[in-house]
Image (cartoon, rainbow, N blue to C red):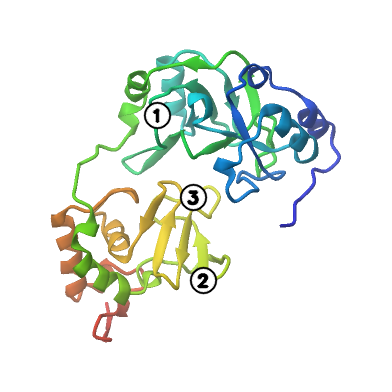
Amino acid sequence: MNLILPPSSPTFEFWRKVSIPTFERNCGLRFSKVGFGEKRPLERNWPKRPYSYSQIRRHREIFVNYGVLCGYGALAVVDADHPDFDRTIQRSLPQTFSVRTGKGGHHYYYHCSGVRKRIVLDRDGVHFGEVQSRGQQVVGPGSVHPNGRIYTPENDRAIAEISVDELSRAVAKFRSPRVRSVPVRKWRTNSGAWNNAIPITDVIDTSRFRRGGGDEIFGANPWHGSASGRNLWINVAKNVGYCFRHQAGISVVKAIALNRKIIADCSDWLTRDQYQMVCNLINSDRWADVSPRGSFRDIGGNVYKS
């Protein structure tokens, strides 16, 4: 991996040496190594390779950027991207250590022991933010966003402690209503046939995707977009995809359901009725409804076009 060193700059010299008192006081917090101007950790198994603050400061002196690991010390970070959501958090939750992000939103740090996984806040086609928890990280204050802006601490105070109920009430109106459903894997015999016979690249427009390693390609998720242009990865050989925003796998059947708005987002499971709707589409001659290019090959090898 070719790592980029920060250019000589008084700004970068300041942030690579400055200490964050809130982090100095919280011995339970843990950190990850991030490259200069990047957001992703450098190490593959980074959730299981935590660094103390004193250890990560040595990395910062060279590369400036670092990550703050959520889950350690019961840390949950509210990542407020949308102004309406940002204002709601400021009104609804107690004041706490906060950081202005490179995109102009805020990271609000809380101790919240009941949060077990990441919460994605999408509703009616609008992305408001996330609650980052166990297995996730946020870019630390003093780091440099890919756009060149600094993650700047704005409220250097103690990290507040909140309950899961407080957090749930604050984010409730920004979450899509969930309907409990039976996962598609209950019908493996049928869904597997479609998932294996139809190339996933026939139902997802990958014309602007870029080549990753091996059999993988990546690009912007076509159903909810991407600021970085790389949150949907597809393994062409395995005929599956993965959405990093929702941390969800994408099969051919699910991609068709998303194209037709049968399900709302990548983390949804199909109900029995929704699965049958997809099967009906595949069995019909309405290929334009399920394929961005209007054609693909069926199980028998016949090519259908809209």
Q: Which part of the image, by quadrant, shows the N terminus? A: bottom right
Please tell me the numbered disc located at residue 215.
Answer: 2
Counting residues from the N terminus, which is met first, the one under dot 2 or under dot 3?
A: 2
**Most foreground residue, 253 or 71:** 71
Q: Are marks 2 and 1 in contact (CB under 8 Å)?
A: no
Compute the Cα span from label 3 to label 1.
25 Å
Q: In x, y percent, where is residue 135? A: 49, 40
- Give the image location of residue 4, x and y in percent: 76, 50
| Numbered disc in front, either 3 or 1 | 1
Image position, residue 222 (x, y; %)? 41, 57
Q: Determine whether the residue tagged by mark 2 lies in a helix, strand or loop.
A: loop
Residue at screen point 68% across, 19% down: 24
Position of the C terminus by quadrant: bottom left
Q: Are marks 3 and 1 in contact (CB under 8 Å)?
A: no
Above or below 76: residue 248: below
Between 94 and 80, which is closer to the camera in this rendering?
94
Label 1: which secondary element? loop
At horizontal 29% and vertical 38% (from top left) the residue drawn is: 176
In this figure, which residue is indicated by the disc labeled 1? 115
Left or right of 297? Residue 211 is: right
Between disc 2 and disc 1, whose residue precedes? 1
| Amino acid identity at mark 3 | Ser
Residue 203, by quadrant, is: bottom left
Amino acid carrying label 1: it is: Val
**Residue at mark 3:** 226
